[in-house]
Every structure is written in structure tokens, then in C-alpha cells.
Image (cartoon, helix red, strand yellow):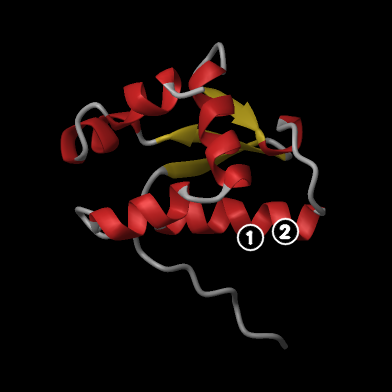
Amino acid sequence: MSPARKRSSVPARPPLDRVLKSLGDPVRLSIVRQLLDASEGEKACGCFAYDVTKQTFSHHMAILEEAGLIQGRADGTRRMISLRLDEIEEHFPGLLELIRAAP
């Protein structure tokens, strides 16, 4: 029997350096931008546009989740991903607007 995958808990207020580091990669920044542009505020995990392997994409998603920027929920057989909008705005006001406005 293999050990269960250990999930790290998201700190109440993620450290700024951790959040900025997570946004420092073009793939992760693209994920956040795609979620900002999502019509319903969330996207199914398989609906993101990316040009890396599935394993690498999953790694990038895990980094964003550990930084407290995104969250996932089960929806039947799909995993829906959304930004933690309220928490991000509370702890880092204006960050999402800067991301949205950046070229």
C-alpha cells in the first residue's frame, strides 16, 4: 500500500515572498490570468491552455495552491480551479488588478 499524498496546509496569510515567487514563472502567471478571465471565476483543470507536460502543469498548480492563490474542488469527474479572490484581496490589495493590467 502506498502512502497517501500529503497536502500542505495553506497559511492564514501566505508570506509575500512566497506569493511573488509563485507568480514569477510565466506558466503560473498564465494560470492566474486565465482564471481572472474565466467567465464563471473557475475553470476545469483540463481546460487550461499550456505548453508544458501534464506533469509539469500539475507541479505549477501545486505551487500556486501551496502559496494560497488557488483552490480546487471536485465536480463529478472534473477538478474545478478558482482563485482565492477574497483572501488575495484581503492580504495583498491590488495584486490581481496589477496582474490583470500587466502586458
Q: Type of residue at label 1? A: His
Viewed as shown, does residue 48 lie left or right of 83?
Answer: right
Is residue 94 depicted above or below 5 in this figure?
A: above
Task: Write down the residue under mark 2.
Answer: 56
Q: Position of residue 38 (x, y in %)?
A: 56, 18
Q: Position of residue 80 (x, y in %)?
A: 59, 35
Residue at 58% x, 74% y is 5
Q: Position of residue 15 (x, y in %)?
A: 24, 58
**Direction top: furthest residue:** 39
Task: Write down the residue under mark 1.
Answer: 59
Q: In this orientation, which residue lies closer to the viewer: 12 or 50? A: 50
Residue at 41% x, 28% y is 99
Q: Type of residue at label 2? A: Thr
State the image quarter where residue 46 is shown.
top right
The local secondary structure at tag 2 comes to helix
**Direction bottom: furthest residue:** 1
Labels 2 & 1 near each other (Cβ < 8 A): yes
At label 1, counting other C-alpha atoms closer than 10 Å, the crowd grade (few under 14, some 14-19, many 20 or more) is: few
The local secondary structure at tag 1 comes to helix
Residue at 51% x, 22% y is 103
